[in-house]
Amino acid sequence: MATMTLLLYLCRLLLFIFLQTCFTSSEQFAIRFQELSLCGNVEYFDISSLACVRCGPNQIRSSSGTFCICQPGYKLISYNGGAIICQKCDENKTGVTQDGFDCIRCPEGLNTDGRCHCNPGTILVERHVNGTLMDEAICEVCDGARPSFSTPSDSENRCVRCQESFINTTQSCECNLPNIHAGGLCFSQSNLNLPAGAVSNINYPQLAISVHSSWFAKNLQASAAACLLFSNTTACQILGNMCVQNMNSLNVLSNDACGLFNIIYRNTAGLGIVQMIPFWRTNLPWLFYGEQPGLASRVISTDFIPISFGFKSSVQDTRLQFIAAVYSAEGNFLKWQNAEGGTLQLCSDTAVKLNAAFNFGTTYRQTCILPLSKILTDFAEPVFYDIYIHFKSSDGVSSLWAVPVLNLNLQYNGKFVNLGNNMNDWYLTRRLFLVDALSGREGTNQPKVIRVATKLNISIRLAPSTQKGLIYPPLITVFYSEILVENPDAQMVPISFLVEYGMKQSEDEIQSDIALGVLGGLAILYSLIKTASWKRRIGSPLIDLQTILKFLLFYAGDLGNVFFIVTVGMGLYWLIFFKVRSAQQFVSVLLPLPEQEKTFSTYIGCAFVLKAIHFVHKILTQLSIDIFFIDWERPRGKLLKTVEGGEEVKNVPVPVSIWRTYFVANEWNELQTLRKINPVFQIITVLFFLEVVGFSNLASMDSSSALNRDKESYKAPCNIFLRYGVSAAMWLVIALLQVIFFTVFYERFMEDKVRQFVDLCSMSNISVLIFSHRCFGYYIHGRSVHGHTDTNMEQMNLNLKREAENLCGQRGLLPNMDTQTFQVSVTNKMRQQYDRIHEPLTRRTGPSRLIDTSPGPFEQSTKAYHTMNKFLGSFIDHAHRDMDYIVRDKLFLEKIIGIEFLEPLDKSIFYNDDSYSFTGVLYYGNEATLLTFDTLFFCIVDLASQNFVLAAVLTFLQQKFFQLIRCTLGRKNLVSKTLVDERFLI
């Protein structure tokens, strides 16, 4: 007993170990993969175990392959919905009844499946009326003569009345020659006013192939005949669908689908029209608008749809109510279907984004790439749509307005007439489909070719000058791609769906052209004045090639300003009147068309290029100035100095310190790139408002003016007018606020570096003479009223105190005047003297620290410097009678147009200048030019990249690059024109 118990426990342990091993195997969930096609003739595919299972005795696999049936000659004796049992029939009853449960004798033999066979025109009868099984089956002949007119049914198990066309044509159920039997109908050739032999081949011009369509071969002739002879509306719809499948093409052949449709259309004119529409024949679908030249333009550009659209739902319609009459390929009316929910969109998306396509004023663009296998699965049978706009008339009646279709694949006598831009050559249609995988089938298998609406565009045009938000009938433009089906899983199909808006912008174009013309003319005049002023300031009366080049440079800058003003104005106009809801109670303004966007882009490009030329010209002009620092400080006392090379000691004047000149020169160098705005703050603030606050959303092509958008909502593409308007306006507004703050608050209450520089000149006893032109420039009078400024701190404080208490003279050039800055127009004689003295300075080839091998050039330059300092000081002190000057105020007109009416012939002229116009040779005085160029650069980069961040980064780098160029070359110019050592310039 103990031994048996031990053996029992041992068996249990072994079983436990075996089970654990089975359930912990790494392949416990792996099964063998078997396909239905791999199952043998006596095996079926079990849908539960997903494996091939052997059938029972005397059984074979069914046609579907998922269950077993009895072999021929065997009947069922047991079937409970699962397993079956089969038994062999007796030798005298070898046939099996249709239900499979009995055996019977068959007088005319057996079919391949073991059932009784009957000849055509007869039906098989196996049971009596009460259901009792006959000993022998009977093949009963149907009576096809009057009055029975019977024929075997499709299942050939009973006699039914034959189709009416057979009775009407032959008075029997037969359709013998010369009558035509097509599509289950019988027609008399003499009564059928249609060409014989309908064309069932479909041409695919994109693939350059032709396909024999089994669908057309079966139904084309029959549907045309039934439509013509019997006014069968279903047959007429089938014929119309086949014409649409044939791209509504009209050719010289009259026996294709559209040719047959047109024959019937003409022959049924007496039946009248539908809904008072001349192109809609009774019993026929409305496929064409007619062939009259110019009809297309009248259809889409003459009548308004009586709906007032707006951007406020409380007052006007804000959505486009498209509705479609949906038909099957068999000609059956399926339903009325709203276009929302993706009815016309092959690309899938959320309901919110799909329905956004029909928000009035929203430009909608949807693209995707679909696998061909998905298209074949989802659109095995084509569905046809007649599109309408649904609205309520003035008396509240629900009404429809037909929407025309422009099929780009339509051919008229072999020409694609709808591909051109001439609207008068177009042929408009009505019906469309999205996918046709039916007509390209040569049999019942997979289609050889399918057509897919890869581009579908809905265009809505606002009626001009109505101010009531009225629109013309929308136009649906569709393009079908022909796809040869080879490998559906690998083939990809690009799809696009577009809803765009437009209006006739001829008045706006005229106004913009007028603005460009007028301002461009003024720019020419202003450039001529600038050129004349430049000629006078360089002291040259001749008109030469240099003059023409200078005029072109001036004109480039002025014309760039014109383009900039016009483009910013256009951008702000569309931004205000389209995006601001309160500006349009009824929609009266829509965004310009793509053609106008191209023109606008050209304008922006011209503005940028011209301003870039102007900007570079400005920098080069600033780098070519002549500048000299006049030191008024005189030696105070003498000192003993041993003469070099000897022992002789002489009394020489105490040297005047050069540090004041270096200090002033260094401050001037720092002023060269001083601006009225902070570029870094400008860029950061613009980005903050555009990207964080959400002003960039105002550039979207929809009616919403909200700055914050729901992430789940559709985001419309950006419009170039709106994006340029938003970015330019944001840049200019922030810059303008900075300039106002800088000039009104910062410079007045904190720090004014330009005024401080003028004060520094007075404190340093140094004047600055700048020649921006050969005979014109600026003078900063820095001569100290105290005579000396090279002194100690105590004396300096005492001098400042005396000035504060008005115990000394004023700093101005003239007595009792405090004007220190002047515009200078000098005579040719004075300039020639300046050039003669300045010549040694211009021969210097580099900084003084590099000229250490030969002391000659440095000594010569030093001598020239002291000579120039003495000459200019004496010139300012009126010491030269033949080179004297006068001081006067500029006339108001002279200030406005920037030209001096008086030419300095005998005496130079100093013009009082309290506006510090010497900053014109610095960045500071050209803020408008810099701001315009930065704005255009930012906008150009953004429009090209559609990225504000990238535009900001590149704008910052551009500013730093030109600032570096300006500082470096400006420092070089300062060193070359004076004796200032570059090592002391920061």
Image: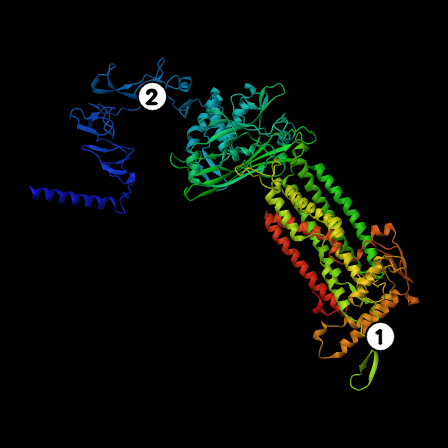
User: To which residue does mark 1 refer?
Assistant: 637
Vertical position of residue 706 compared to residue 793: above or below: above
Residue 879: x and y in percent read 91, 67
Give the amino acid at mark 1.
Answer: Gly
User: To which residue does mark 2 refer?
Assistant: 153
Count the marks: how many?
2
Residue 417: x and y in percent read 58, 37
The answer to whether any part of residue 770 appears in the image is no
- Residue lying furthest top in this view? 147
Quadrant for the C terminus in the image: bottom right
**Quadrant position of residue 88:** top left
Is the residue marked by circle 2 packed among few (<14), some (14-19), or many (20+) residues within 10 Å? some
- Colouring chosen for the image of the structure: rainbow
- Residue lying furthest bottom in this view? 647
**Quadrant position of residue 981:** bottom right
Q: Which mark is residue 576?
A: none
Residue 180: x and y in percent read 42, 25
Give the amino acid at mark 2.
Answer: Ser
**Quadrant position of residue 860:** bottom right
Marks 1 and 2 in Cβ contact (< 8 Å)? no
